[in-house]
Image (cartoon, grey):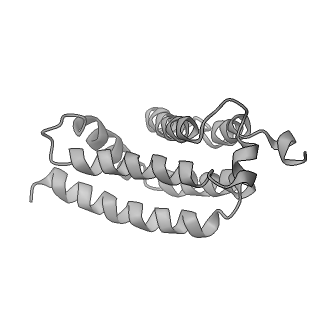
Amino acid sequence: MNPDELLAEVLAERDAEEWQQGLEAVASLDQLAPYLSELIRHHQRAPELMRLWIELAAAASRPDHPAHAYFVEHYERGRAQFAEGLDNEAARSRLREGVSPESAAALFHAVLNGLQLQWVLDQDLDIIGPVTDFVRLLFDHDRAAE
């Protein structure tokens, strides 16, 4: 097994643990931003792992890369799980009008990954505030009261 395959295996194991923790911790949309804030803080305690993940993800964009399948599956599963979480009427009614669950899922991953990349480049940058703001933009909290 080459180093990239080994790293992909380690990341897959970490992902499985984090997905399970997320499913257990986020029972409603109101719990999403606080959970993400804690998850980001956890990742920030290991900036080298975050950097390795970003570097490996970029390298794995090549279809012949050993970790390509891992990243394709990672994003497919993440988008599907996020969109699935919006399948029930209560959650879907909170999604900002005109935004599909599938689009919300893609945007969600793009924002999280983009902000983490920015933080790796500048560790003085606050990315928790923007993640919280993005969740507020994605979900119309006023519609929850209707």
Q: Residue furthest top?
A: 98
Q: Nearer the viewer, residue 62 or 126?
A: 62
Q: Position of residue 86 (x, y in %)?
A: 63, 50
Q: Residue furthest right?
A: 146
Q: Position of residue 144 (x, y in %)?
A: 84, 47
Q: Position of residue 133 (x, y in %)?
A: 71, 37
Instruction: Specify the quadrant of the image occupied by residue 108.
Output: top right
Which residue: 25% across, 55% down?
A: 8
Which residue: 90% across, 48% down?
A: 145
Q: Nearer the viewer, residue 138 or 43?
A: 138
Q: Nearer the viewer, residue 113 or 123?
A: 113
Q: Across the whole image, how many numbered discs are drawn on residues? A: 0
Instruction: Specify the quadrant of the image occupied by residue 32.
Output: bottom right
If the image is split into quadrants, where does the N terminus sit? bottom left
Q: Residue furthest left?
A: 1
Which residue: 47% across, 63% down?
A: 18
Q: Is residue 67 above or below residue 130?
A: below
Which residue: 17% across, 37% down?
A: 63
In the shown orientation, is residue 12 left or right of residue 91? left
In the shown orientation, is residue 56 left or right of residue 111? left
In the shown orientation, is residue 25 left or right of residue 78? right
Q: Position of residue 12 (x, y in %)?
A: 32, 60
If the image is split into quadrants, where does the C terminus sit? top right
